Amino acid sequence: MAINHLPNKNIWGQALVDNLINLALFEDIGSGDITTNALIPPGAKGEAYIIAKEDMILSGIDIFKRVFQLVNPPTPPFFKGGLGGIKFKDKFKDGETIKKGKIIIEMSGNMRVLLTGERTALNFLQRMSGIATLTRRFVDEVASASPRNNKVKVIDTRKTTPGLRILEKYAVKCGGGVNHRLGLYDGILIKDNHIKAAGGIINTVERMWDDKPHLMKIEVETKSIKEVRDALKCGAVDVIMLDNMDIPTINRAVRLINKRALIEVSGGVNLQNVAGIAAIGVDYISIGALTHSAKAVDISMEIK
Amino acid sequence: MAINHLPNKNIWGQALVDNLINLALFEDIGSGDITTNALIPPGAKGEAYIIAKEDMILSGIDIFKRVFQLVNPPTPPFFKGGLGGIKFKDKFKDGETIKKGKIIIEMSGNMRVLLTGERTALNFLQRMSGIATLTRRFVDEVASASPRNNKVKVIDTRKTTPGLRILEKYAVKCGGGVNHRLGLYDGILIKDNHIKAAGGIINTVERMWDDKPHLMKIEVETKSIKEVRDALKCGAVDVIMLDNMDIPTINRAVRLINKRALIEVSGGVNLQNVAGIAAIGVDYISIGALTHSAKAVDISMEIK
Amino acid sequence: MAINHLPNKNIWGQALVDNLINLALFEDIGSGDITTNALIPPGAKGEAYIIAKEDMILSGIDIFKRVFQLVNPPTPPFFKGGLGGIKFKDKFKDGETIKKGKIIIEMSGNMRVLLTGERTALNFLQRMSGIATLTRRFVDEVASASPRNNKVKVIDTRKTTPGLRILEKYAVKCGGGVNHRLGLYDGILIKDNHIKAAGGIINTVERMWDDKPHLMKIEVETKSIKEVRDALKCGAVDVIMLDNMDIPTINRAVRLINKRALIEVSGGVNLQNVAGIAAIGVDYISIGALTHSAKAVDISMEIK
Amino acid sequence: MAINHLPNKNIWGQALVDNLINLALFEDIGSGDITTNALIPPGAKGEAYIIAKEDMILSGIDIFKRVFQLVNPPTPPFFKGGLGGIKFKDKFKDGETIKKGKIIIEMSGNMRVLLTGERTALNFLQRMSGIATLTRRFVDEVASASPRNNKVKVIDTRKTTPGLRILEKYAVKCGGGVNHRLGLYDGILIKDNHIKAAGGIINTVERMWDDKPHLMKIEVETKSIKEVRDALKCGAVDVIMLDNMDIPTINRAVRLINKRALIEVSGGVNLQNVAGIAAIGVDYISIGALTHSAKAVDISMEIK
Amino acid sequence: MAINHLPNKNIWGQALVDNLINLALFEDIGSGDITTNALIPPGAKGEAYIIAKEDMILSGIDIFKRVFQLVNPPTPPFFKGGLGGIKFKDKFKDGETIKKGKIIIEMSGNMRVLLTGERTALNFLQRMSGIATLTRRFVDEVASASPRNNKVKVIDTRKTTPGLRILEKYAVKCGGGVNHRLGLYDGILIKDNHIKAAGGIINTVERMWDDKPHLMKIEVETKSIKEVRDALKCGAVDVIMLDNMDIPTINRAVRLINKRALIEVSGGVNLQNVAGIAAIGVDYISIGALTHSAKAVDISMEIK
Amino acid sequence: MAINHLPNKNIWGQALVDNLINLALFEDIGSGDITTNALIPPGAKGEAYIIAKEDMILSGIDIFKRVFQLVNPPTPPFFKGGLGGIKFKDKFKDGETIKKGKIIIEMSGNMRVLLTGERTALNFLQRMSGIATLTRRFVDEVASASPRNNKVKVIDTRKTTPGLRILEKYAVKCGGGVNHRLGLYDGILIKDNHIKAAGGIINTVERMWDDKPHLMKIEVETKSIKEVRDALKCGAVDVIMLDNMDIPTINRAVRLINKRALIEVSGGVNLQNVAGIAAIGVDYISIGALTHSAKAVDISMEIK
């Protein structure tokens, strides 16, 4: 399995992720871990491992490791005060399935760093793996139902936890999903509120066409067969979103569009109805729940 | 109902919340909302409202409003470019119950600001209200089961979304819960990993006693009746956590402790078993799921 | 004339512009304007005006005004120390032509603020107006030469001054030009180095197609008729860039492409040859010199 | 040739330069180089070189190299994701003359880093070398015309690109020029607007004398022989600026001053008239065009 | 002697200390050390040592060393420009006594770094050692006077230099003192102004009890025997502060409290009266002068 | 008395001061003032005053007031949560003498803000007034001893508290002293370590002369009559510092220099010997103790 590590790829990811980890460490550690600092000598060493308490898809193992590194930044020698780096033995990679009871990773190094970083590192790993695990369930449902010649894609939304979007979109990829636009700046999606505010689909698409960057496509949200017809009339629409339609309506819309635009189904999709939608053979099914309603996976850290 | 607005209270809260909102706006808006900017003239005005799509406890209405203010910061006149402030008509306060279909708040003002801020503002509100709503269910269970003379408190953990702790702990209060320590710096909690690393409960508490700030109490995690006994022997333990014990063991521990320390039950608590624990009459029940596994509440914004 | 104020439109613009102005003020003022602070009493008032020393297109008048506001931020009353805000009388708007000798704007207020902010404010205004003025010359050339039914657009590049891109792209719009993608993140442009690194146009476009965000188009750089042919073969190419071709070759390429893709001419374009290219009837002519080689327009500030 | 690397010398330079590069990388890369990331595998290696497309004086080669390092910061091992450092083979040093067609520097390493950093690195190098190249032309003119016993110096102004002053002043040194004060904080220059605001040269210098830091000299701008006389009367003036005077007036002023103060000629200096001014034998000729109107030198990067 | 290095222990300390050093370096170096940069070639090497000009307790030697490291950050190779790291030979550790005339530490490395960092490094070391030295005098007085079975502790206050609290509290520990709460967030201390504002001790403690975090104790300030009685009545008071009482009153209060609460004496304590207070056998004596009125110790740096 | 408000004058001051206050508030308030927040309702109002507990020269009253404003930033309406601004009644201005027992300023407004900001505001005011008070004692000594025709000036050094230099230099001015250079960037002072490193005074001054900014003077430190002679030989020395000389040597040096350079006496100056030095009639006496060894003045805040 080959996942392209989103947070690794560019300066934004790098900076955003470190900023986020520091924010999380700061809110947890504040002026110091008074329990650990009182109990554990600065130079004490130890070993620990992380264990899956339920079946899961792994996501965020690099973030998990990065947390400990930011607890203990690789500063100059005379600031080390006996703190050593943490060493890791990876057992799994992001995107892989881990069975309940398996050890995910082993760690050794400075005991204070292990204990102080534990909760923050787990909070990231549990949330990201929770999203990957839920995504995989949707992806599996869709894969089994898709028409042979039309691989339907599970795609995320902008309904992410504020500040964590880049990590959550990465977790969706670990689960086998595909990313929609990252934000309002890298894709055009005309929603019902835009249409209301600008006065009808045809008007709206025309105005968009005049002012849009020439390297971008146009997606339009539709809520009825009539709106699908309007969207098709514009000519300039590249992707049509079918929002909150029932299965017969989706079916009708798909036949109406007839490959003249890519089709994204959105709204009210869940594990019960997703296979039915996939079977129709649309291009994308977007699911807010992947990110806004995933539960944390149960993972715990044990000191050896 | 009187909720003390945590994020309002101090400089940290104020700065953290604004930082978080800006982070969220930035990851969503980036170099600009190309759809809205193309479709809506800078000076266009509009009205919108937010509606509950399911029963919920409200949390985060001030954050929701603050988002729009940071999309449109109150800068000097010649930078306003026709953007006006957004006006709000509050219908509910944080902590109140809202029935499905009710309007939560009405808004009017610059249309671009309304459309560009919508998703980020909702992402905060849906997540925070989700936590408050789940917390309320636990609180109600506990309230109905608590002994009359012993009001058991529902309390949160440090298992929060990285970077959002201050908001999530506030949401717990909106739901009727109580906050445990904010982080590692403002409370002492000796966990099993500390005890393993430092060598037994008695040793550990003694070492803690020598080095702890004189205005702080000591809480110790115990996993068995034997460990409860050890904790009691130390004399210096103010709070005993009963971790992952079944109900008969909790019962035994409570009788053994006999008011010599406050009691917190933790681990594996859910809506099915929480009433049974509350009925025993402990002081606190801490529940990680309040923050790590709450689902977003369904709320949507409509342009009039 | 209607220019959509780019830096005004969104949070990124707002933050970037203020950051840039503060950077510029800081590098100029540092620990204080020792000349002005010694000579002018804190509360002294004065009047000044800005005058065009050559014909120009105005760009950056809001930035000019913002500079003085950041020298003298609207802080609380007891920090004012006699410093008052600066008042402005606008004579021209961005995008308008100003003749040599005309007053551009009049200002009155605190004398220290006027003198300390002068150089930084002018540095912005002179550079931005320089770009707008040069752009207008290209736009006028192109307008007079374009085929009647095919309005050729003058478009900028990423060859901007580091850190000032958003302002320089805005200045191009003030001059009547159009913006290409803002950066590497909001548009796909496959350049010769990509093709070399990935192995041929056809291979490259195919790989791009598999991994690209579904709301983005594909532009490919071509250096010969053969490469244009390859690009057309791919089917998936939306825009073809003709890079550094002479006019006969451009002509051949345009006939070959025959409306199957948008056409952008790039490389070695100057005021001498731009009309000839425009006359062929391509869609875009991109010109690095608009931003990387514009001279500052001569503007000075006089105290009355 | 020995150029003292300004940006290297101190904490301010170091911090300012990195900040500026990050700003430039950020505005270009944003949420990711979508073209390169889709086309080039994370671990791919490559070679490239930079070539002069016209005769030039080099300036900014360290900044050029630093850009690639900040695209790929030397972070901990587990964040490397296959990205390796870039290796450079220098062919020239800042301040040296490079003929058209010569290779300036060779590079090898991670292909993504090479492609993503290219434009930003070139934008710095082209602008800085443009300033150095223009400065050298002025310096050569002045050197050939200066009286033998009086080496006239070419000196810059504060008319620099906002935010880039430290780099542009360094580029002036690479071209053989000398730096005037860095900003308003490290030198006293009484300009005509100060004199107008404070009431006459004599008054103004007196007031300056009372309040100035005791380790600083005083320079005064004069616009006529009368003002030169006033400046000389003050006694306390160390440097006299002759602003926008024609050559006969400069000649008269030089004889009048007669070594009682250093002399700086300023205003309206260009490649046509600079030798004539130099021949008079003043101390400094300051030229705004060095920084505000230099064109970018043509340099391009080729993948091998 | 074993001092636990406070600034080393956690992310807050690490970040705060570096931030503070950078602030100090910035205010001193600004745009460059013009004297050193003109006189010393970039690559020159040298040796230096630091010498005590009076008897002292050492505090801050790690901060001293860190200053030179931040003058010369461990950046990538091509930015080193001949600057090498500074090497140190420690002669003493924090908390140790150093006699007048002794060498504290020897240094060798880049001469520019040594000269540019000198003043800032000494400013930290002299202030911190001044606090440690004064604290030690109080600690020695108290140690000789304390009852055998009741080791009275010397404790600091929040009367620290703004921004330097973490360093000054660390210096108090080096001198043998103990730290009170770090700030308003990690300990509860009800002062007279709180009592006035909330209406009497009993009322106040009750209200505090209801809302306080369950892992914190309560300390109350009392100004008279009557207030001590009120505090005792509350039951919930863990620590009683005797503020500005004379020795007979302190004696009476101690007998009255009779071990029912810890006792802290505060207000007007000096080297003359501290032994008398210690002899009574209270738990803590808090002394603002430790931090707000310590003089810098005389230390100087010599180039060999 | 006319004191020019240094922190008010420029962007650096404004930014540095706010940054410093925020740093100080942050280290004190952290995650919240738990005592005040529990005891005082958010909307409670109150009055307070600040009283001098000893004779003093006031310095920092604007900083004092600014602290409360940053506790309670003037944010948008819906974030005010009942917090009102604090109102002040000034009784004295910076630089004025205040007798023990006098009220310095009266305040009214939100009670939480008053109580939470108290300590930080006082820490600034007490330290700054301590410096002003000590400076005034030196200034008075010097004024009474100076020759009639030669007003000797008391001048500060760079021996300031790290991070607080701008405030401490301002406090020196409030006390009647004069500021030396602000840092290493705005004045040239060749010290003994420079001379050692560069090889003799004459060599050193020559090298300095070649590379120094043309608007700066040169000061040289001398330790003996021989070194004074060397400094005079250079011709280019504008100011001579007599370092650690006894009074007869100073006398000899003054006669030797004979007005050919300004004279600064430095090293080992205290309240006992300062008048003797002043009587000789030098230009400046610089005193490190003004800033590195001033005690905090005793000031307290009372709630009415």
Image: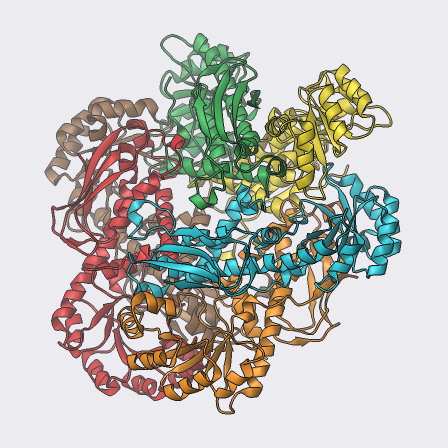
Chain colours: A orange, B cyan, C red, D brown, E yellow, F green
Nearer to us in this view, B184 or B51: B51
> Left or right: B238 with respect to D194?
right
Quadrant for the C terminus of chain B, please: bottom left
Residue at 54% across, 54% down? B59
Say whether residue E174 is visible. no
Residue at 54% across, 80% down? A274
- Residue D230 is situated, as x and y percent measured from the top left of the image, at 18, 25
> Left or right: C168 with respect to E85?
left
- Residue C259 is situated, as x and y percent measured from the top left of the image, at 25, 84
- Say above or below: E184 vs B226: above
- Say above or below: C16 vs C257: above
- Residue F99 is situated, as x and y percent measured from the top left of the image, at 51, 12
> Left or right: D244 with respect to E225?
left
- Residue B16 is situated, as x and y percent measured from the top left of the image, at 53, 49
Say whether residue F197 is visible. yes
- Say above or below: E195 vs A232: above
The quadrant holding residue F208 is top left
